[in-house]
Amino acid sequence: MADDRNGDVYRAGTFIFSGLALLLAFAALAVSGVAWSRSNDTKDSLRTLSAGGLLGHKVNVHLQEFTMTVAPDSVKAGDVTFAITNTGTITHEMVLVRAPDIDALPRVTVATAERAVGDVDEEAIPEADLPGEATVKPGASKTVTITLTPGTYTMICNIDTKQSDGTVVSHFQRGMHSVITVT
């Protein structure tokens, strides 16, 4: 009789354990299905937002002696907002030029009172290829919105700073430039 009771207890325990395992398996399946559905819904929403132009219209520009960094480096065409921050100790600018890279920019070949040899010759660039610019004082920030068409744009700081010893430092020639792509 004791063996029959142990057998009954064993069968009942197995039945209860199997039922709990099955219940937990169904619960895990339900949770993973909901997670999958939400993941796809989020991806669909992001695709919709991106296609509608609600994402990708802002560029953060960081200016400092003598660097210019941008993020992201690719945006959608249309009204693009540039959030520019100058963490440097001298004034910098962001001049936006429709050009594939710095090698495509015209250069100053004869020094003037305002430009050193090797600087970008902004006067030689067609006005249509200069969609906008902003000058930012040290420690300040500025936001500008510029309408851009698809293409590649080069950003430069074309300021020359005269040092106390009389030498001229060209921000552009020291490396203050970056490129963004507009799609």
Image (tube, grey):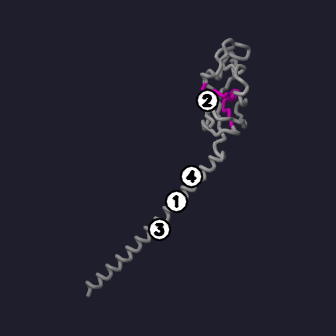
Q: Earlier in the sequence, mark 4 or mark 3?
A: 3
Note whether 72 is above or below 163 in the view shown: below
Q: Earlier in the sequence, mark 2 or mark 3?
A: 3
Say which quarter of the image contains residue 170: top right
Q: Nearer the viewer, residue 91 or 58?
A: 58
Work out whether residue 78 can be spotted: yes
Q: Is residue 91 magenta?
A: yes
Magenta region, main secondary structure: strand
Q: Amino acid at mark 4?
A: Lys
**Could you say whether the residue bearing mark 4 is in a helix, strand or loop?**
helix
> Which quadrant would the C terminus be assigned to in this image?
top right
| Residue wearing tag 2 | 178
Residue 43's disc number: 4
Residue 35's disc number: 1
> Which quadrant would the N terminus be assigned to in this image?
bottom left
Residue that appears at 41% across and 73% down: 20
Note whether 39 is above or below 73 in the view shown: below
| Residue wearing tag 3 | 27
Q: Nearer the viewer, residue 74 or 3?
A: 74
Q: Amino acid at mark 3?
A: Ala
Note whether 78 is above or below 126 in the view shown: below
Q: Residues within 10 Å of mark 4 (few under 14, many from 20)?
A: few
Residue 171: x percent and y percent?
65, 23
Residue that appears at 60% across and 53% down: 45
Q: Earlier in the sequence, mark 2 or mark 4?
A: 4
Q: Earlier in the sequence, mark 2 or mark 1?
A: 1
For the record, the magenta segment spans 82-101
Question: Disc 2 versus disc 3: distance between alpha carbons?
Answer: 52 Å
**Could you say whether the residue bearing mark 1 is in a helix, strand or loop?**
helix
Image depth: mark 1 or mark 4 in front: 4
Question: Disc 1 versus disc 4: distance between alpha carbons?
Answer: 12 Å
